[in-house]
Image: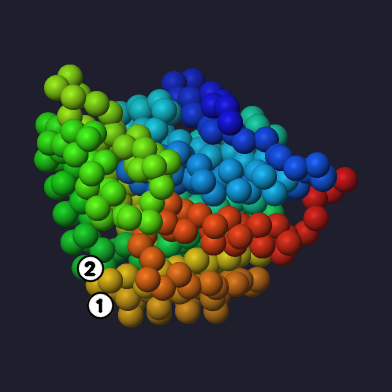
């Protein structure tokens, strides 16, 4: 694995974690992996390792302000971040990639595919890409999230305490995923963890999500799509998710749905074997790359 530095504007460069294709057979289509908000590209490491071993080059992007990418003060709305992705895909010569997005990354992947169908040959949406954010349940959730981020800007937890917490709450996660989650933070001068995004940047992303409905993009998607939803633990949200996924399934032209019941939001960390298998199945659904 190597880290690539990809300029996407005069002031912003993105960090991209690249794994070359393994195996002795022909190289398959590349995969572009997009993480969620307040996350980072390292959360894909276990999935990326499996997909690369199956013969596909893999590129996992740190979005602006996340992971090791540059963090400008603004420019976090979806249009700007998708613009970053177009620049990165073009620079890396990844036209015809298979794109997988998790959470906010799924919304970005959906918009990227709708706006630039020439760049994407297939799409996987992992617990995202169908949520409607302009509703009371989701508004309340994101306002609480912004409050947590705002409070954490002063640093409240050490890396050791965060590791202990993650091991207790996510016993299925490997050490790789736990360390990847820690990369969501920077270490303050007192040794305490501070979120990389400010609460204002978080709410800028949320406001962008509230302004666009995933359903608006569905008619523009012509590539094969895999939807990988979980069933949320909140009863009033679980019924809504089922309805959103059913609407997406009805609207998308070439779609497969695989539910992950009993899993939590970070499927790529908790179920890397299953997610890698679904990503590789997409390669079989997509048209073979041109020779």
Which numbered circle lies on residue 236?
A: 1
Residue located 28% across and 71% down the image: 233
Rendered location of residue 18, percent (x, y): 59, 33
Q: Quadrant of the N terminus?
A: top right
Residue located 41% across and 47% down the image: 174
Q: Nearer the viewer, mark 1 or mark 2?
A: 1
- Report helix, strand or loop for mark 1: helix
Q: CA distance from mark 1 to mark 2?
A: 9 Å
Residue located 53% across and 32% down the image: 16
Please report contact status of discs 1 and 2: CB closer than 8 Å, yes or no. yes
Total marks in image: 2
- Report helix, strand or loop for mark 2: helix
- In the image, residue 130 sits, relative to residue 247, either above or below, namely above
Rendered location of residue 106, percent (x, y): 47, 55
Q: Quadrant of residue 56?
A: top right
Residue that mark 2 sits on: 137
User: 44 or 141, which lies in front?
Assistant: 44
Decide: few, some or many residues near mark 1? Use Cα within 10 Å; few <14, some 14-19, many ≥20.
few
Rendered location of residue 217, percent (x, y): 52, 62
């Amino acid at each position: 694995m190597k880290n690539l530095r990809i300029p996407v504007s005069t002031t912003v460069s993105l960090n991209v974690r690249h794994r070359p294709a393994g195996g002795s057979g022909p190289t398959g289509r590349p995969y572009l992996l997009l993480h969620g908000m307040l996350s980072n590209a390292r959360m894909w490491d276990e999935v990326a390792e499996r997909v690369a071993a199956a013969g596909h080059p893999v590129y996992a992007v740190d979005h602006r302000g996340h992971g090791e990418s540059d963090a400008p003060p603004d420019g976090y709305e979806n249009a700007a971040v998708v613009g970053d992705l177009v620049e990165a895909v073009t620079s890396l010569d990844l036209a015809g990639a298979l794109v997988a997005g998790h959470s906010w990354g799924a919304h970005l992947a959906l918009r990227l595919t709708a706006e630039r169908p020439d760049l994407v040959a297939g799409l996987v949406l992992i617990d995202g890409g169908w949520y409607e954010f302009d509703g009371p349940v989701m508004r309340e959730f994101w306002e609480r999230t912004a409050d947590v981020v705002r409070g954490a800007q002063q640093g409240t937890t050490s890396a050791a305490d965060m590791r202990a917490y993650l091991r207790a709450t996510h016993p299925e996660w490997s050490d790789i995923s736990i360390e990847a989650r820690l990369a969501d933070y920077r270490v303050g001068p007192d040794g305490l963890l501070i979120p990389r995004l400010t609460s204002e940047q978080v709410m800028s992303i949320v406001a962008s999500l509230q302004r666009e409905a995933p359903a608006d993009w569905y008619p523009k998607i012509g590539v094969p799509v895999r939807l990988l939803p979980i069933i949320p633990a909140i009863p009033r949200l679980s019924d809504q998710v089922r309805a959103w996924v059913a609407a997406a399934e009805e609207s998308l032209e070439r779609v497969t749905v695989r539910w992950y019941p009993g899993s939590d939001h970070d499927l790529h960390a908790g179920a890397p074997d299953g997610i890698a298998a679904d990503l590789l199945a997409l390669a079989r659904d997509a048209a073979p790359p041109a020779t």
